[in-house]
Amino acid sequence: MGVKIVQRHGKTLREKLYLPAIFGGMKTTLRHFTANLSDTPQIKTFSYPEEQPQDITERYRGVHRLTKREDGSVRCVACFMCATACPAECIFIEAQEREDGVDEKMPRRFDIDLLECVFCGACVEACPCDAIRMDSGIFSFIGKKREDFIQTKEQLLAREAKENR
Amino acid sequence: MVSLSVDGKRIEVRENTLLIEALLSQGISIPHFCYHPALGKDGNCRMCMVEIEGQKRPQIACDTLVKEGMVVRTKGEKIDRVKRSILEMELINHPIDCPICDQAGECSLQNYYMDVGLYESRLTTPKVRGKKHVDLGANVVLDQERCVLCTRCVRFTEKITKTHELGVLSRGDHSVIDTFPGEKLNNPYAMNVVDLCPVGALTSKDFRFAKRVWFLQSEKAICNRCARGCSIFVDHHKEKYGSEKIYRYRPRLNEAINGYFICDAGRLSYAHENALFDAQAMIRGKVSEYDYAEGKWLRLLKRYLGKTLFLISSSLGLEEFVRLQKLAKLYDIALSAYEPDRFDDRFGDTFLKCADRSANARALPLLGIDDTQEGFQKALQNAELIVLIGRHDVALILDAPCRKSVVVLDAGGMTCEEVELMLPVASHTQKEGTYINVEGYVQYSACMIANDKGRKSLLELLGTVLGDGMVRAQEIWEEEIVRLEPFQNLSFAMLSSTPRIVL
């Protein structure tokens, strides 16, 4: 393995002392502290969960969904690319023969265990059919028991993309 | 011997060898579809192009005989361009539906594209469409679009099975493989065309969509369905939160025994193995804890000391025979391997399938284990406890006039209230063992799929009873088997080369 030598920064006495830099930083903290103390309504917080965040971007990796074809049927062909790419091994697929003539193969079962998922997005990257996306915008998923977090094919298909405002 | 130069390296091969054979024997990778060692050359795919010095154009390696002083180049800008062009032509009408193709992961087209292809498609016209799902019969499904027309399957039915069911129909880019009108693929070796097919055109109906191949782990084993003992790969996988499951058997090259092929009956027998994986310990027909059942087996053995008969299967491994024989001698237990249903004349043929359905009965006379009906009847009369080992044909005992206690030590199978104890042991693919085939070849089956039910192998159970703790085949070979007269010229290490003994 190669070794890369990185030059150490800060050769002057002022830099070696650290203290001027620390006081510089503390000055900024103190300035914000006093400004906020004198004008509380200006603090950038909101009352979650009554108020929902408005800055969820298009690229945000939320809870997965399975996309559909134009005719409304499942787009996934159960090729297992997502399950292969998944570092958490949280995608459970069972394939079956597709009988409606649209394609040959489809998933019988497509479960994602959200408790194991690390929301890395590797499944979306791996999918050759654009059948799985994480654009639902759901950043907080609530369940009452463990089984609620295992998202089935039907639940994933029912989910729609987040509308962009 | 002829010496030639390949990519600047000198190699020596026998005269009259095909250039492709010479290259492959040296471990040089050379793309090919139509050439197959068992089917010979055909020269139709044009993938195996090499440059030969002195020849104007690139030549196909599969239809060129080696010559003294030949200078061959398999790599380089020029030859790669030729290979890329040929691959591009093969892929013109290929649907590239790898996501739904069972061959993906072990497909020659995919591999060659990654090696020499990697071009952008220049095709602007629509692809020629074919039928996607043609049931050829015998568990073989044909996808005409994926086919590269290498005709390996056609030549297999011509040269190996001589049944001639398949042919190439139509001309030009409408050429397709199909069965002749009104016929179906119908021979006991038909599923070998699935392995022969270098692409995903012929797939197995049995394995269809069952598993992506890159998840599978392959284990080397010996088929135990008849006396031939074909070499196979056992492809298995343990799903997360699931248990071990075998998905398919594939033939494993063994020139001495089965070549490149196995029969369909053997190939599909993996389902039988899978069914055994769930067997539970039973006492008088009721499910029991394994440890308790194992204790009961030892207690029964002790109670009926001197009045016990071991009725063993002739398909057990050589190591198990030797250990059982040792135990029988030590505790004065009668030993019989009588099997009324050993021979099945409807099963046998002249190629691979044998009428003798026993995997290892050849070892019985070598070890001096009795397998006659008279010997069995005599031993049965004197015994009070009958232990069926590796078999569960309890009807043989229960039909006997006087009542006996019956214990079954088998991988699985039926049980009933008449059976005192059913103790499941490791099945064929869960245990190692040595088997002697019908021609006297001694083969070692190394496949030991882990069992998650805490079930022990027969060798482990015998190791406990004998108290010497010898449970591995290698130990038993080194300590006991090599001392026996028929095996004195062998050693455990030699088994990988399939030695032959005189029967």
Image (cartoon, grey):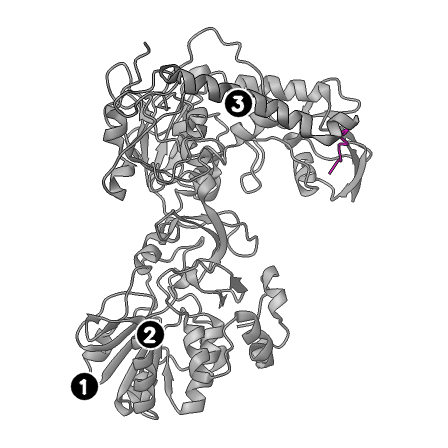
| Location of mark 2 (residue) | B291
Report the Cα–Cα distance between label 3 and label 2. Answer: 70 Å
- Mark 3 or 2: the one toward you: 3
Report the Cα–Cα distance between label 2 and label 1. Answer: 27 Å
- Callouts 3 and 2 close, C-beta under 8 Å: no
Residue at 47% x, 53% y is B232
Query: Against B363, is B3 above or below?
Result: above
Q: Is residue A57 visible?
A: no
- Callouts 2 and 1 close, C-beta under 8 Å: no
Q: Residues within 10 Å of mark 2 (few under 14, many from 20)?
A: few
Q: x, y (%) of residue B82?
A: 65, 19
Image quarter for residue B311?
Answer: bottom left
Residue at 48% x, 26% y is B149
- Callouts 1 and 3 close, C-beta under 8 Å: no
Q: What span is in magenta? A: A1-10
| Location of mark 3 (residue) | A30
Report the Cα–Cα distance between label 1 and label 3. Answer: 96 Å
* Residue A94 horizontal side relative to residue B287, left or right: right
Q: x, y (%) of residue B451?
A: 39, 60
- Kindly identify which numbered label has been placed on residue B403: 1
Residue at 34% x, 92% y is B305
Q: Is residue B327 visible?
A: yes
Task: Reply yes or no: does residue B503 show up in magenta.
Answer: no
* The N terminus of chain B - image quarter: top right
Residue type, label 3: Leu
Of residues B158 and A147, the one drawn nearer to the viewer in this rendering = A147
Image quarter for residue B211?
Answer: top left
User: Which secondary structure dominates the residues rendered in magenta?
Assistant: loop
Q: Are marks 3 and 2 on the same chain?
A: no
Badge 3 sits on which subunit?
A
Residue type, label 2: Asp
